[in-house]
Image (cartoon, coloured by chain):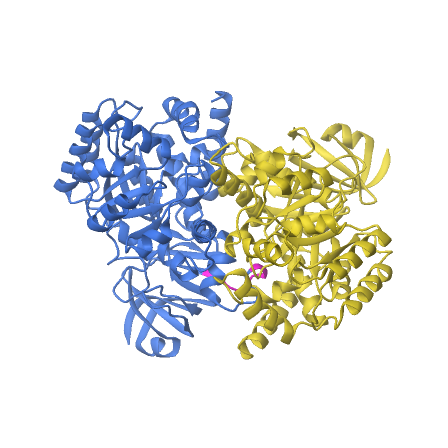
Chain colours: A blue, B yellow
Amino acid sequence: MEQIDLIIEAQTILPLTQTQTVLENHAIAIDQGKIKAIAPTASLHAQYQAKEVVKRPHHALLPGFVNAHTHVPMNILRGLADDYPLMVWLQEHIFPAEGRFMNESFAYNGTLLAIAEMLRSGTTCFNDMYYFSENITTATLEAGMRACIGATILDFPTPYAKTPDDYFSRAEHLFSHFKQAHLISFAVAPHAIYTVSDENLKRCRALAQAYQLPISMHVQETQTEVEASVANTGQRPFRRLVDLGLVDDRFMAVHMTQINDEDVTLLQASHAHIVHCPQSNMKLASGICPITRLQEAGINVAIGTDSTASNNDLNMLEEMRTATLLAKVSTQSATAIPAYTALRMGTYHGAKALGLEKIIGSLEVGKAADLISIDLDQIEMLPLYHPHSQIIYASNRENVIDTWVNGRALMRNRELTTLDEEKLKATARAWAKKLTAAHV
Amino acid sequence: MEQIDLIIEAQTILPLTQTQTVLENHAIAIDQGKIKAIAPTASLHAQYQAKEVVKRPHHALLPGFVNAHTHVPMNILRGLADDYPLMVWLQEHIFPAEGRFMNESFAYNGTLLAIAEMLRSGTTCFNDMYYFSENITTATLEAGMRACIGATILDFPTPYAKTPDDYFSRAEHLFSHFKQAHLISFAVAPHAIYTVSDENLKRCRALAQAYQLPISMHVQETQTEVEASVANTGQRPFRRLVDLGLVDDRFMAVHMTQINDEDVTLLQASHAHIVHCPQSNMKLASGICPITRLQEAGINVAIGTDSTASNNDLNMLEEMRTATLLAKVSTQSATAIPAYTALRMGTYHGAKALGLEKIIGSLEVGKAADLISIDLDQIEMLPLYHPHSQIIYASNRENVIDTWVNGRALMRNRELTTLDEEKLKATARAWAKKLTAAHV
């Protein structure tokens, strides 16, 4: 008998590999953070002796969700300013609030709040873009979560950095300081075409090449952005980025609600990735990314929640559901983005966008044990006919019962194991008091 | 000191009247099912002595949601057939399953499952359209919930009725048999223009007039429905219904994703109501009801979930959120249907569509005590800046903690008081087994 760390038994295992599989009466063997075996429960117990056996008799096990775009510290700003268009929201509410309040503890506290929310809704990995990335990383390490931390680059000063040189030197410090952190990867994250000059975009390219990192960037989020770029330079933003050499198979174009034929051709040729944030795009009235068309063209589409300031939650279950509902109504096809495809977008395709598809994104032997359990026996989840579509169309965040990252239970039976919920809530209340008193 | 039944104290009371009010440190006095007073907590206690005092120190109290269109027994069919267009879904999956399995216990069990789900997500009143309405009503009375029960009328036979005469006589039996039921009201519910002949529609009109009831009907749900009507009769469905005399201020047009200028004029002139079911319309790719335009034209717009076979939940919080997000993206205006408007659509405007706006839909002295508490102090609900938008954009069904109907707690601290959850779950599992075995 081989000694291992953990066996998890469940009613149903949904590996979310390329083939749509439903395993009944199976269990997962986990050792040293990795999936060792997925097999019928009896045969697994015959082969392995586990330090811990977790039984989830009316649950599904599936890969944790990959939130491919968010700004975790902004949890401090959840619901600060709703029902405004993107530019008013940014320039009259978010930027001023950030200018006054953003600092190291804002980033650290906001990240812990966001991670608590993500673990409670089944997300095991997130791709971030914000300031004070060192503090974001510290919080993420404390929580034990997996993340790709973006080093944000901007032309203009913020409380985080005064000059472009500052941003770049902080980025390099981030990459080198945390290079041993096993669960952390990095990205270069130029904010957008309207906030980063061509010169600094080229420096981003060089930085990404030097450190062999992906680039993550807001691209063609709104029609206004595209029109301004065409007026200023004669080119649409994505075309400009291609010409500047930023776009390859490690480039994540976030939002892309504005897509024309040339964009599709450029995406196909470059093998760049799309990160679709449907609820944020709806809430800010930015537009609809045509994900059905992109998927048909062979382009990888991941899903992100964006921040709680524009969503206003980090709930990937609802985000995947919204992605399929919006795809159906906008293409007038009820067969668009079926449940299984939506689930894959929120797991494997997210991992692929981050360059992590060999490590996470599906339940397979040798991959990291980043997985969740969902209770299939709640009033809202019964009767059960098809588990994949039940999860996409009927489940919600409270149905997620356990969340493991790299084999470690970060939520067990709805209890967070590495974070103190009451303390986090007190922190959130204190921030609300501070911002409310300042009338931001 | 006046003796009364109940005082509920809360952090925040959101009456959801026409003026956007947030009451802090207030409480609600309730007696004999009605709201007796809403006042500062101390002054309320000085005036009333209550048999029960409920303290909800970090919760909001607000009116319960009015789900203005659903088919509650279909909870048995949740997730049976997803990712299909309306007509394939109906004719190849739903109608055959109903033909084989629908009976009195299907209706009764499905209703109890649906009510459990609705109470757990803050709905206190629903407007139903299905078969075996007597059994639906019996289950609703057992649960203690408020409902408007539609008497469905169709041309063709179902397990419920063989002929139009059957449907009409069962409707009259329903209305007279339950006429004493305090929390139950009724509607005449012709299914749709493509399933009910002009002759039977006229009988529906006469029946509604005889019993002084509203009419609730699927209208212009899809483009196909409109085109077929125009091809067959030269008229769009809504125009035909107006000409047949069915449409007045007690008519609820459900769905209406297809709306032209003439429809708007007819809606304005008749003061008919729209019931918007955004998630169902998205999932079945039916289209988008232009609710911003309708509201601007002064037309009353309520919200419904439709059934769990096409949604796949009865979660009004998510439905209101989807209504505003879809309105914003489809009109390219982030200011469309702000949070408060969305909340009013899910409460007062629903009550108005049902003709119950003098009884329910807002927290006001003299109205029925149909209300809910929402926990504002969960990780997903913090920090808190604006309670109305927090509820619309960040809360979800699990944040609903208590549900009172007519002053009676039907859910207290997440525990249902009139329904046995474990028994209901066993019933749901049994139905799933039966349908799965039959390969429907």
Q: Quadrant of residue A198?
A: top left
Q: Please say whether residue A287 is visible from this viewpoint.
A: yes
Q: Is residue B357 above or below residue A47?
A: above
Nearest the camera: A185 or B345?
A: B345
- State the residue at coordinates (82%, 56%): B207
Image location of residue B158, percent across then percent down: 69, 71
- State the residue at coordinates (47%, 25%): A435
Q: Quadrant of residue A177?
A: top left
Position of residue B266 in the picture relative to residue A357 (left or right): right
Nearest the camera: B379 or A393?
A: A393
Q: Which residues are magenta?
A: A374-380
- Number of marks present in the image shown: 0
Q: Is residue B184 above or below residue B326?
A: below
* Residue A306 lies in the magenta-colored region: no
* Residue A379 lies in the magenta-colored region: yes
- State the residue at coordinates (41%, 24%): A97
Nearest the camera: A417 or B153?
A: B153
Image location of residue A298, percent across then percent down: 28, 56
Image location of residue A303, percent across then percent down: 37, 49
Q: Please say whether residue B58 is visible from this viewpoint.
A: no
Q: Is residue A320 above or below residue A158?
A: below
Quadrant that contains the N terminus of chain A: bottom left
Image location of residue A344, percent across then percent down: 36, 58
